[in-house]
Image (cartoon, rainbow, N blue to C red):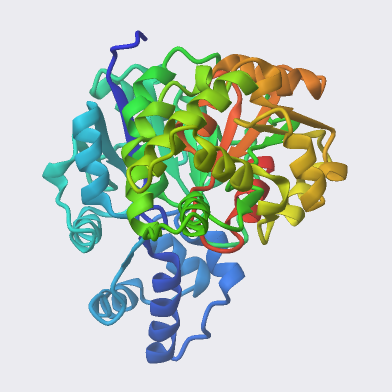
Amino acid sequence: MTMGSVAWLVLDVDDTLVATFEVALAKAGEVAGLMGLPAPGARRFAQLYGRMPFADCVLRLHPGVDVDTYTAHYDSLANTFPARPLADVPALLAVAARAGVQVGILTNGPGYKTERKLDALGVRAGDFTFVRHADNSAVRKPDSRAFAALLADFAIDAGSAWYVSDAPADWDSSAAAGFGTIAVTSGPPFRSAPAVAPDLVVHGVDALTALLPVLHRLGDRPRRHGPRPTAVSFDAGFTLIEHIRSAPEVVAGQLAAAGVRADPAELQHRFDDLAHVLADSARVWSSDQEIGAVLRTIYREVVERSAADPDGGLADAAIEEYTRASNWRLRDDAQLALRVAAWSHPVGILANWQSDLATVCEAVGIAGLVHAIVPSARAGVGKPAGGAFAAVAGALGRSPAELLHIGDDAVADAFGALHAGGRAVLIPVGAPAGALRKSLEVALS
């Protein structure tokens, strides 16, 4: 695998792209009522759902039932209980095309149901490099030969291939065939733990869109890690903590104190226009001096579009106000996530931050919950550079390959941890409440 090689993203369908467990359970209950059968409970249904052919599942739930009659009733409810999309697949495919990532489908569902679900997503089979389903695949998941067949039939390098699914059995079988494994937490409850923890955990497929442009660079990642991570690190900003006043709000306040009115929304656009200044994050966040110089460049340009600031006093005051510890607070589920991780693992914090990160952690009440706090300014390099992950892993007495890193940034956090040989949880800003805790529990299995 070379830096320019093609990356492959292969997607499960049920409860990865469309929410079918809840729909299937509702349909099964409706059919049971029509046929005078006992309605299946959620736990029993989850134990069978997606793990065997439909007819076998029906007979396990209702021994001796007329499968043809049951199937006819079940299929007649397709419009009454439509599949609910879980992802913006057209947007994913558009980004994949620009990034040169090939996208395929591997599902156990029959062809006609797969077509119906893809239609609900606004896509068709022809939009993918391949679509493998029960009618055109000789082997069903979770048999690893289903994945090996994809490698052979489409000349896929396993080192460049990733399988995305909600099912632990899929993670194990795709990993056995050499795929990287991406778990989504949108699936049904009551799933058993996998034999091997997934490489990456995301709340939903949409989170992968930001990772696609760098996916091909993960082909050369070390893949020597064990079945489970043995240490955990968290990003800080927008993973564990969040600002109280945003940078545009702070700047607007400083300008107002100087007698100049500015719209925070317009200031946000100015900050967005200058995001490229932070592109080389490994260098930008490598020392307090580098961080300070780059922040001053950004803030002065933002300020000077509204008011003269010849000595940079307004910009410097805004930086000091935004970055001080009192402007940060704990996110709702952060403390619980830290306690879940620390129950059985050494835990650290690794963030692209100035050297005063420990002061901020103390102010929000989490410094005592972790074993190490590693700001990039002290590590000497920012994420996603491997040296940053080596620094926090070393502080925890581990190697990067043993590390699970949790963060909100697809490149700095997820790509960085994976490229260093570890595992990752990606929780973008705006993820629903509870997503961090649930994803962490999946990642730790």
Front-lying residue, 107 or 341: 341
- Locate residue 128: give its quadrant: top left
Q: Quadrant of residue 389?
A: top right
Q: Residue at x 64, y 24 (%)?
A: 376
Q: Of residues 271 and 154, which is closer to you in this image?
A: 271
Residue 189 in view in this figure:
yes
Seen in the picture, residue 376 relative to 408 is either above or below; the reply is above
Q: Is residue 436 left or right of residue 8?
A: right
Q: Measuring 28% from the left and 73% from the top, which residue is drawn there?
A: 82
**Is 54 or 216 nearer to us in this picture?**
216
Residue drawn at the location 66% of the way across and 57% of the way down: 331
Question: Picture coordinates of residue 211 (x, y %)?
Answer: 39, 34
What is the quadrant of the C terminus in the image? top right
The reply, left or right, for residue 340 in relation to residue 222 is right
Q: Residue furthest left?
A: 126
**In which quadrant of the rendered view does residue 406 lie?**
top right
Where residue 347 appears, as percent x and y from the top left, is 78, 36
Can residue 170 be seen in the rendering of this structure? no
Residue 116 pos. (x, y %)? 20, 62
As rendered, which of 282 and 267 lies closer to the eye?
267
Quadrant holding the N terminus: top left
